Image (tube, rainbow, N blue to C red):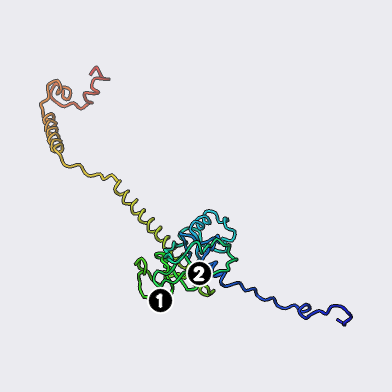
Amino acid sequence: MGNDGGSIPRRIELVKEKQKDVKQNPNVQREAAWFYCALSKRALELPIVADRLGKLYNQDVVIEYILDPAAYGDGDKICPYITTTKDTIKLNLTPNPSYNEQQNDMSTVVGSLDRDLKSQFICPISMKEMNGKHRFVYLDSCGCAFAEQTLKEVTSTQCLSCGKPFDPTNIITINPSSKDEIETMTRAMEDKKAAQKSKKGSKKRKHGEEEDDKKKNKKKQNKVIVDRPPPSSTTAASAVMDKVAKELAERQRTKPVSNAIQSLYTNKDGSSKIKGNYLTMGTFNRYS
């Protein structure tokens, strides 16, 4: 400090300045997103799937992650919303005729990319390469991928590749760059999941009501219906038998009684007996 032969410090050694943000190579980030699986960091290979936030994956890697979420260390940060294969869409990609696998050895570890890679896929209409230099979208209704500009120029409600109908809500941006767009897509994904869950619940309730109705109808059918027996000849026969029995009883009542029977109810002189009847007569008063 006093020029006494010692070292003279510079200002940068005495004053601590704000550390500058480390800027990553945009080309490395772009190629990592468009040429490599977002989960395994391995080169993309068919079949390729995409989630509703536009991230690209190898299909076998997604299946491994669903079966074992700990298979890839940062899976809970990259795609915690993927719990089933239905959370991803299989992409129908158009091969790039100018792609040469030998010249584009993508086995390089992500982070050491220092060359311009050629994409395996292109837009089937505009022939633009799917390499991140052009915005690409896919339709979650069929999985076909196109350059975004192509869908804007060709206004159609049917897929330009397979002809399947779609609406604007089916258009998903692949690897969106802006935070606002990612937030918008996240909200749309959550809303769609909630709508599907609500629809599934209503189907279950409807199915339960139908099952209850079926059970009620089945119970009604299983009830034993007791009908009155049809009239038969036995009814007429029983009426005739009743009539005959009444006539026989009347004849029996008016039938003349023998002298022996009459003597039980009358005296020798013909007068009726007052004391007792034939059940008690002579039982106790044998002298009379």
Residue 111 lies left or right of residue 62; in this view the side is: right
Q: Farthest residue in the front direction?
A: 103
Quadrant of the frame with the N terminus: bottom right
Residue 277 lies left or right of residue 255; in this view the side is: right
Q: What is the x, y in percent for residue 144?
A: 41, 66
Residue 165 lies left or right of residue 175; in this view the side is: left
Label 2, secondary structure: give it. Answer: loop
Q: Nearer the viewer, residue 236 or 130?
A: 130
Q: Is residue 79 visible?
A: no
Residue 268 lies left or right of residue 167; in this view the side is: left
Q: Farthest residue in the bottom direction?
A: 2
**In 3D space, how far apart are the residues under numbered discs 1 and 2 (Cα atoms)?**
18 Å
Residue 152 - label: 1
Closer to the chain start, of discs 1 and 2, is: 1
Q: Is residue 131 visible?
A: yes
Query: In the image, what residue type sits under mark 1?
Result: Lys
**So how many labels did they put on this image?**
2
Q: Residue at x 54, y 68 (%)?
A: 31
Q: What is the x, y in percent for residue 221?
A: 29, 48
Q: Residue at x 42, y 60 (%)?
A: 200
Q: Is residue 74 above or below residue 277?
A: below
- List the residue tagged with mark 2: 175
